[in-house]
Amino acid sequence: MKSPSFGGGRRRSSSSGLPEKMTHSRSSSNYSSSTASTSSHKSTTGSTKNPVKNAARTVADALVACFTPPETPKNSVNFSVSSDKSDASNSGGERRSGSHRGIYGSSCNSTHIGDPGSTKFTIEEIYKATKNFSPSFKIGQGGFGTVYKGRLEDGTLVAVKRAKKIVYDKPLGTEFQSEVRTLAQVEHLNLVKFHGYLEQEDERIIVVEHVPNGTLREHLDCVHGNVLDFAVRLDIAIDVAHAVTYLHMYTDHPIIHRDIKSSNILLTENLRAKVADFGFARLAADSESGETHVSTQVKGTAGYLDPEYMKTYQLTEKSDVYSFGVLLVELVTGRRPIEPKRDLKERITARWAMKKLSDGDAILTLDPRLQRSPANNFIMEKILEVALLCLAPHRRNRPPMKKCAEMLWSIRKDYKEFSTSDIPSLSSNAQRSSSIREE
């Protein structure tokens, strides 16, 4: 698989990808520079003095808070958490350039969006594309509605997301408008591509590209038969980091996804990742105005929620970073974030994995379907160390998503070197300092 580009772009510019230095720079990618809790990563050497162990214990203990709904503060809105059910739905985010408010600063009656690539479909075109919403075309079901495969007149395969047909529901209407506004203004290699929408009477439909190979969660569960090898899992992690970095840093106004999880990551036939489902997304705080967070209701999926966000109702980009840390643990272990049928100590996967890392038993967290090799063992621990940073209980100690991407790029570079080296030299390399080298 080719190295994924940080590219992407906004629909209103022909080329607005991230700067090249972002995908190659290593000058700032030492773990020691990410946070004080990782000043010397030496867990790969088995040192008992490694501060990673203490930090991992702290994170493991703090993860309990993720599953305790907060007390609702006065004048607060509702607490809303979805269950982690795999689906093929794709939904959108609230964004309005120059403001931290949602899309409802404009009229909800006008659904036409003038950005290039945003087509307002007719119901006749939708019926034709989906064969009148044929059950045989159904490819997914989510809280928002049903997703169908369709084919446009020009032959383009699309996913047609049809909202539930109920008397106008304000929350669903909000999610629909959010999705349309966000998808119409962002474009990136690792985000689902927006084709258009329809809003007519009780029909609310969004049309995005069809990503044919299912979700990451399905692949981790081996629904499609094959086991994702470690190299592919690392590539997927980097793809997701690229997409979220783009949302946080390279859009007109930073966007917080709020629902990063394996069932919202679609895979292409070449196993490239595309982040979907923007239903909970919203604009980040306006830093130019001195704002540090957005006060909003808690939304997300149990197991992925930032505990600090749950306690304070203060949303920042670091909430996505936390969810990404949980995703990294999923990629290493193959387990779901919550495993209710396992022993009590193993039910919260991230807490269990961080405890194993702190005890020097990280190898026990490796997905049993993956081969144990010096290269896999070494890189597995490095990925868990990145997850450890992302899962810090306080957002100020978590790295920005750009930093996560840089660290994962360095890990992939090491992985490729180790995979092609002789076993004796690999063993000696594993004893070196865990600081990431400059390229």
Image: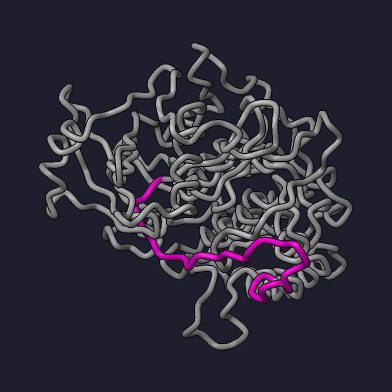
Magenta stretch: residue 416 in it?
Answer: no
Where is residue 252? Give x, y as percent. 63, 24
Q: Write the residue at 50% across / 82% down.
A: 340
Q: Is residue 145 left or right of residue 278?
A: left
Q: In this view, does 13 lie to the left or right of 152?
A: right
Q: Write the residue at 62% across / 50% down.
A: 426
The image's colour scheme reads one colour
Instruction: Name the image quarter holding the C terminus.
Output: top right
User: In the rendered view, would you say 405 is above or below 220?
Assistant: above
Query: Magenta segment, principal secondary structure?
Result: loop
Q: In this view, does 164 lie to the left or right of 41?
A: left
Residue furthest top in the image: 14
Q: In this view, does 40 lie to the left or right of 348?
A: right
- Span highlighted in magenta in the image: 66-90
Q: Write the residue at 37% across / 45% down.
A: 267
**Residue 287 picture quarter:** top right
Where is residue 25? Give x, y as percent. 71, 27
Where is residue 311? Give x, y as percent. 76, 66
The residue lying toward the viewer, choosing from 110 and 6, is 110
User: In the rendered view, would you say 287 is above or below 434?
Assistant: above
Q: Is residue 417 visible?
A: no
Q: Write the residue at 76% across / 34% down.
A: 286
